[in-house]
Image: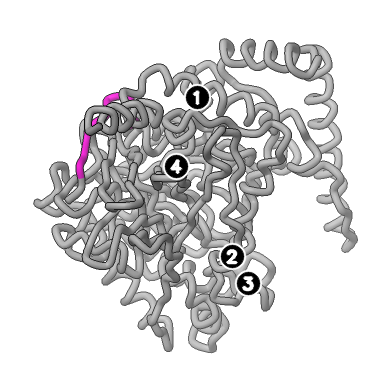
């Protein structure tokens, strides 16, 4: 039996678990829209019967949760590598949470400014079986946290057991893969609409003119989808005057052909509010502020939602992969999606990245992509993904409508767009690093000029059959990393002020009980 307590200071889908090592008694503080049962709590969806709560053993699970059975207590992260669970222990207790911000606030821990957290951000790129769980923090009693991806963690009276989630799916051809995807997606949608939930979930999708989100939407367009989110333009690293076609990413016409209503994600900087830091604080990687309007819309709904996304489609459906990417370890190309970790808990949505389904079977899926049966859907070149092309074209979408040009997503984001936050960040840089506003802005504009100059040279070089290696990368800019450190401290301090339960309160309560017993 799980002791559950609603904490109004937590985001609607956030939870924090406190577990006694000796007895395995468990208390979970949770947000208003976390689903609660006698033997599990969950903010997630899977292909099984919701009321049974067996998400710990599901092949596909999106979200996070905690369950108990005769074997022990299961801490369960998403099988989509866009989310993680945090875990730690002190002398007498285990703790876990699906929110880094809330966990730090609850524990009374801080990040170590002397440590480079880019290592933790990028570590999952080693694969789900080889990444390092270590996540250092500053705390008198807790040496470090662990970040848990993909594989569940089981707690028993004998200690911690790190589980390995495997897959026994087999695909011999396109039809077997497609039909299994469809079958499981229907089951996931049924799970999300289960009458045993206190709130059945809405569903949204994302769409563009690229391969991945377009294929995702074609797969689920008939599963009671409220609307599709799209942008008129991509966040391409190309300036529109350099290559106008490179920035056009509007999936409206495709969405309409699939019978879906469209909502636009395009924003202006003056529309970004003081909650921008929630997009910046999860990792040092690029904030995905493009989803700000979706975050706002879902926040205003009383009902939580699932959002179908195309993260990892660049690997699972890519016809041209090296041997390293074909291992069962699930090797990502980047950490995109992970920076939605805090905003999705706050607004109330579960990230459902379909390409991660059966991702351990990438070798089989890659063989299908390169099979003779898929040659009619292969267009050649570096941007060639026959599986998503067939999925979409089989819905009578024309070949010319999508998947013809890869949209880059690199952009500079060195200070907040919100004016008040921007001024607060300027003050932080001045007070802590002696970096003035003029120095910051001049560096920013110079780097932009250099970056776009290199993009222009690269474009010209490619037309001449040559190549150049850019010197400006996400790792060469340090201001954005300082913005990450500032934003997470900002969010943790805000959360400390509204949390109704903290580890220090639990310790005082336990000491009072011990004193009374004596």
Q: Which residue is mark 2?
A: 127
Is residue 8 a member of the stretch shown in magenta? yes
Q: Which residue is mark 4?
A: 230
Distance from label 3 to label 4 (Cα)? 29 Å
Is residue 6 visible in the rendered image? The answer is yes
Asked which secondary structure carries label 1, the reply is helix
Q: Residue at x 64, y 51 (%)?
A: 122
Q: Which residue is mark 1?
A: 491
**Residue 325 numbered tag:** 3
Residue 207 in the image, given as x and y percentages of width and height? 44, 49
Distance from label 3 to label 1 (Cα)? 36 Å
Write the start and end of the magenta stretch as one range: 3-11
* Sequence-wise first label, 4 or 1: 4
Q: Is residue 509 above or below residue 183?
A: above
Distance from label 4 to label 1 (Cα)? 28 Å
Residue 271 in the image, given as x and y percentages of width and height? 48, 19
């Amino acid at each position: 039996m799980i002791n559950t307590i609603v904490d109004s200071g937590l985001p609607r889908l956030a939870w924090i678990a406190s577990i006694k090592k000796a007895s395995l008694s468990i208390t979970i503080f949770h947000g208003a829209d976390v689903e609660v049962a006698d033997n599990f709590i969950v903010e997630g969806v899977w292909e099984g019967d919701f009321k049974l709560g067996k998400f710990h053993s599901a092949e596909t699970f999106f979200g996070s949760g905690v369950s108990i059975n005769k074997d022990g207590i299961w801490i369960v992260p998403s099988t989509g590598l866009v989310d993680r669970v945090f875990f730690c222990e002190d002398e007498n207790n285990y703790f876990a949470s699906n929110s880094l911000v809330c966990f730090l606030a609850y524990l009374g821990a801080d990040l170590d400014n002397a440590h480079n957290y880019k290592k933790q951000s990028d570590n999952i790129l080693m694969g789900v079986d080889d990444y390092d769980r270590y996540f250092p923090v500053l705390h008198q009693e807790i040496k470090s946290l662990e970040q848990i991806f993909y594989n569940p963690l089981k707690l028993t009276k004998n200690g911690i057991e790190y589980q390995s989630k495997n897959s026994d799916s087999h695909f011999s051809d396109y039809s077997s893969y497609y039909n299994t995807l469809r079958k499981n997606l229907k089951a996931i949608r049924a799970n999300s609409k289960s009458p045993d939930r206190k709130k059945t979930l809405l569903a949204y999708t994302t769409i563009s003119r690229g391969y991945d989100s377009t294929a995702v939407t074609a797969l689920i367009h008939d599963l009671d989808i409220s609307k599709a989110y799209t942008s008129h333009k991509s966040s391409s690293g190309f300036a529109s005057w350099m290559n106008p076609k490179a920035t056009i990413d509007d999936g409206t016409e495709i969405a309409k052909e699939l019978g879906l209503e469209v909502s636009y994600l395009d924003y202006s900087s003056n529309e970004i509010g003081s909650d921008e830091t929630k997009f910046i604080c999860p990792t040092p990687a690029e904030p995905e502020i493009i989803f700000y309007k979706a975050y706002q819309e879902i926040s205003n709904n009383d009902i939580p939602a699932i959002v179908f996304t195309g993260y990892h489609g660049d690997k699972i459906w890519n016809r041209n992969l090296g041997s390293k990417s074909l291992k069962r370890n699930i090797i990502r190309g980047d950490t995109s999606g992970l920076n939605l970790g805090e905003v999705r808990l706050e607004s109330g949505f579960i990230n459902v990245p379909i390409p991660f389904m059966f991702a351990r079977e990438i070798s089989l899926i890659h063989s299908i992509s390169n099979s003779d049966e898929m040659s009619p859907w292969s267009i050649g070149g570096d941007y060639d993904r026959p599986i998503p092309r067939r999925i979409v074209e089989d819905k009578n979408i024309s070949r010319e409508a999508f998947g013809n040009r890869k949209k880059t997503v690199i952009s500079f984001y060195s200070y907040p767009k919100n004016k008040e936050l921007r001024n607060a960040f300027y003050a932080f840089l001045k007070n802590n690093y002696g970096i003035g506003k003029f120095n910051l802005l001049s560096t920013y504009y110079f780097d932009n000029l250099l970056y776009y100059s290199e993009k222009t040279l690269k474009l010209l070089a490619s037309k001449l059959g040559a190549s150049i290696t850019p010197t400006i990368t996400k790792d060469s800019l340090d201001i954005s990393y300082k913005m990450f450190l500032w934003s997470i401290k900002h969010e943790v301090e805000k959360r400390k002020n509204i949390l109704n339960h903290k580890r220090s309160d639990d310790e005082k309560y336990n000491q009072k009980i011990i004193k009374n017993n004596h």
